[in-house]
Amino acid sequence: MSLLIKNGEIVTPDARYVADIFCADEQITRIDRHLPAPPGCEVVDAAGKYVFPGFIDPHVHIYLPFMGTRAKDDYATGSRAALVGGTTTLIEMCCPGRTDDALEAFELWRAQAEGRSACDFTFHMGVTRFDDRAESQLREIVRRGISSFKIFLAYKGAFGIDDTELYRTLRLARELGVIVTAHCENETLVAERSRELLAAGKTDPGQHHESRPPTVEAEGVHHLMTFAELTGAATYIVHLSCREALAQAIAARQRGVRVSVETLIQYLLLDKTYAERPDFEGAKYVMSPPLRDARNQAVLWHGLRDGLIQTVATDHAPFDFATQKPLGRHDFTKIPNGIPSLEERVNLLYTHGVRAGRLDLHTFVDVASTQAAKTFGLFPRKGAIQPGADADLVVFDPAYRGAISARTQSMNVDYSAFEGWPLEGRASVVTVRGQVAARDGRFTGQPGRGRFLARTPGHF
Ligand code: URP
Ligand code: ZN
Ligand code: ZN
């Protein structure tokens, strides 16, 4: 089975040209003008459209037991939503509880995806406890194809680790050539401020961001940077939301700390007033770190444009508004954290980044695809358009006009944080290793065809 994408305008971080792309045996094999279609070849006419490398979401939660409930998507629905929106590779956080066995958790997460996911996938291995047993299991997990860890400085008692564990995790990562992704918030400050707010009767969703202001995140980043500096480990700050935290990361980078930065589509487009909406509607917008004052958005856009921030992810964590968010109706600390957006990241980033003149096309591709591939050991198999790369491609229609609605979304959750938001452009044909998996907002792929992407450490 072969595929020919004709006459599209190919865009990568460093090139832009019109050509045909021929794909066979799951890979791109030729790029040239006027390529012929052999018998039986599927032909996609991409005239007037862009062709991008398949987009990569480097931070999602699909299987997530969390805050007394479980995120709504599974790999069947999550990968479908990803593909409809142009995302062809998922990197999921494998998040065992503190008492769970790391190796068992890794195999459990992998089993959730194998046979269900329609797109390719890999994991950041959550280190939620570090002792001798965990260490030997982490070494084994790396041998099984994982080259990134995930740690939480927040959520103490659940996923969070203490400073001794942090130091030892970073030492191990340095030794193995593994990059450590980190949720950076000072948990003691969050806990104390939450206690004070609740004691004062301030229980509504709008208090969530009061409990974890920008300085709490900046302190978390500073803390991680200190440990990274002393251990020499490579680090990646997940879901960075504000100017204060970015300043800490940049200061550390300037003194030689190895650090990459991820922000989220939510922080670029939404602000804290959404979480202050009345009648508990703000719960739809509760996540951690929280949505910030709108002034931070320009800082994050500029950070992407200037190369200070490397990636845009979603931290997709879907919890229903009707049945799950109300766990925190009388106590904001119990609202399951997360704002679903896996399906709309690419289209929103194009509409509000490229169309709005905030990002050029090359930076758009870089931050939504190629940088994640390079940072996490997937490049040039993913994130590239060149012979030998996997034929994960997005034919993108810049003339599309439409709007986002929960009624039409593929994500398995009962609301959209972007309800009614207009889109100017969308992923029109999406391929996974040479097979069309989505067309014009509809999944047409093969459930379960996605593969685990084994990675080798030491790639950065
Ligand atoms: O609010 C969030 N971010 N939910 C998912 C868990 C995490 O912290 O990444
Ligand atoms: Zn997090
Ligand atoms: Zn997350």
Image (cartoon, helix red, strand yellow):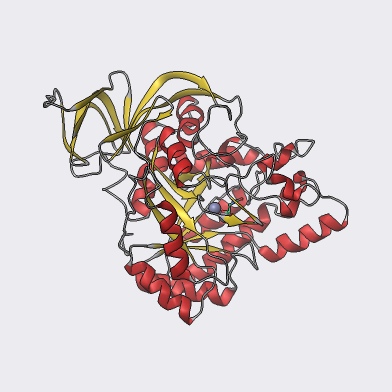
Question: Which of 332 and 437 lies nearest the eye of the viewer?
Answer: 437
Is residue 252 in sight in this rendering?
yes
Asked whether, in this view, residue 118 is left or right of residue 185, the answer is: left
Residue at point 43% right, 38% down?
Answer: 80
Q: Indicate the quadrant of ligand 2 in the picture.
A: bottom right
Question: Which of 290 and 136 lies nearest the eye of the viewer?
Answer: 136
Quarter of image, res 293: top right
Residue at point 46% right, 37% down?
Answer: 81
Extreme residue in the bottom direction = 132
User: Which quadrant is home to the N terminus?
Assistant: top left
Quarter of image, res 4: top left
Q: Position of residue 63 (x, y in %)?
A: 51, 53
Q: Position of residue 105 (x, y in %)?
A: 47, 65
User: Which quadrant is home to the C terminus?
Assistant: bottom left
Asked whether, in this view, residue 202 is left or right of residue 101, the answer is: right
Is residue 149 in sight in this rendering?
no
Asked whether, in this view, residue 365 is left or right of residue 391, the answer is: right
Q: Is residue 324 above or below residue 186?
A: above
Q: Position of residue 382 (x, y in %)?
A: 30, 46
Q: Number of labelled discs?
A: 0
